[in-house]
Image: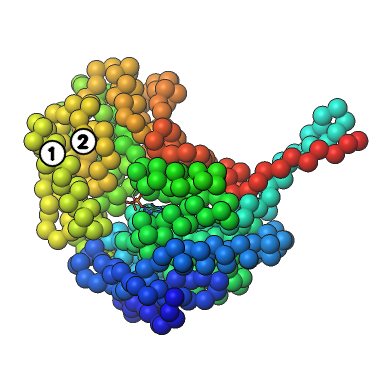
Amino acid sequence: MTREPQAAVIAGVTVDTRHWIDGERVASTETFTDISPIDGGALGEIARGTAMEAAAAVAAAKAAFPGWAATPRAERARILHAIADGVEKRLEDLAIVETYDNGALLRSHRRGVMPRVAHNFRFFADWLLQLEHEDFETRGHTNHVSWDPAGPCVLITPWNAPLMLATWKVAPALAAGNTVVLKPAEWSPLTASLLADIAAEAGLPAGVLNVVQGYGSEVGDALTSHPDVRRISFTGSVPTAKRIAASAAAGLTPLSLELGGKSPLLVFADADLDLAVDLAVEQYDNAGQVCLAATRLLVEEPVVEEFTRRFVEKASALKQGDPRDEATDIGPNIHPRQLEKIDGFVQRALAAGARVVIGGHRNGGQFYAPTLLTDIDQDSEIVQEEVFGPVLTLQTFADEDEAVRLANGTRFGLAATVATGDPERAERVSGQLVAGTVWINCFFVRDLQAPFGGSRESGVGREGGTWSFDFYCDVKNTVTAP
Ligand code: NAD
């Protein structure tokens, strides 16, 4: 490791592009170039971590663990609130840097995402302070359940909502008294570095939060197979999750996996059709790069014509363009390779006989036109595989049974959305859906105290509220004789 200053200056905001290990900036001998999806321009040279930096970060997390674990809950909570204050103070910097780095809308980062990042810290700080289990008795003995910090945690995150997804893990892991090594995605490494600055300014001791930059394939195994790591929480794709699970198996390290999806939106003939169309068009948010997105539109036959007419009208009015522009609805996709992947899915679907309702092509730069495809089979690739771009499919169903069969007919089970005017139907159908979250006549309403995760290949385990503490802690029962 060399120690030379490296930084990127993004719209006037300076971001250190080195690792953050044991309270110090650490460079690597090699770097990689971080590209902006807005114009393909280089944003900076990022430290390219290796097994050596991974080991140094885990060692720092291990050394800092006893001190942080012994820090009283109230003090840990105070520091997490101070981090939230720092996020709010630097909200504009974070929003701008994230937009340059991953191409998502600046207005969403300003008004939705970054306030939520601060909330992640506040919520888990407050949850920690009220976390307790009522003691119960067994033949006069008292059972007392406690949540003991587990140790160093490795947190690996994707690029589609970089800081939001990172802090959804960092906040509960730290609140629980653990230390952390965060590995952000190589396509969006910058805001994690700003978070390290903010946490240090908030008084988080050295080594409690470490950030290692680099390619998953190069630092990944060293982090996930390390014998001193006590928890691994990963958000990303299914193939990577399988590699991580294999690597973690060596030490039987507990895993939380939040993975991909191919979620359905079921539109029944009794639904408020305007609401159903709004929900469907919303699936283009973040240029379709949302794990929870209901990319499969399943519409009851009698209303499909009218639904499609209103959908096309509304979707055609979406403005695709520069994510810094307040009027833009859909920004670019993250990377030329992602665009290539999206177009590959669409072209193969067309070759297999799918019909374009709208879109179906690139839109210049790193943009893909919002697309709706129909005339497709349930077992076709475009229905079964996650595209992770602004590409939806439309299928019809004749009755409730068929709707449920189509909805459940993939290897995923992350989320499902149901549009219906009949509360009894809503209850009946949601009870049969295989999904970690079901939304009835709404989408993306997320309370941090709710369990979050996926069924089938969409994930392993749940995080959120007490579920997060269950995962990030060694839960202990102490039985005391009378
Ligand atoms: P990805 O799996 O390619 O990468 C995710 C992270 O894993 C990156 O930081 C990457 O560097 C790292 N990684 C890659 N190989 C690794 C290895 N061998 N060991 C350790 N780490 C490694 O996923 P992506 O393309 O960045 O993200 C998109 C995927 O994430 C989609 O499938 C999407 O659905 C999913 N996602 C899921 C959720 C959820 O909450 N369920 C949320 C957002 C995104």
Q: Is residue 17 visible?
A: no
Element type where label 1 sits in the image: helix
- Quadrant in the picture for residue 459: top left
Camera-nearest residue between 112 and 13: 13
Question: CB under 8 Å between callouts 2 and 1?
Answer: yes
Mark 2–mark 1 distance (CA, rounded to whole Å) = 8 Å
Labelled disc at residue 372: none
Q: Earlier in the sequence, mark 2 or mark 1?
A: 1
Query: What quarter of the picture does the C terminus occupy?
Result: top right
Query: What quarter of the picture does the N terminus occupy?
Result: bottom left
Camera-nearest residue between 177 and 396: 177
| Residue 186 in the figure: left or right of residue 315 | right
| Residue 112 in the figure: left or right of residue 42 | right
Residue picked out by circle 1: 348
| Residue 35 in the figure: left or right of residue 133 | left
Element type where label 2 sits in the image: helix
| Residue 456 in the figure: left or right of residue 201 | left
Image coords of residue 318 (percent x, y): 19, 51
Above or below, 154 against 324 in this view is above
Residue picked out by circle 2: 382
Image coords of residue 319 (percent x, y): 19, 55
Q: Amino acid at mark 2?
A: Ile
Above or below, 45 against 337 in this view is below
Query: Pointer 1: residues within 10 angstroms few (<14), some, or many (20+)?
Result: some
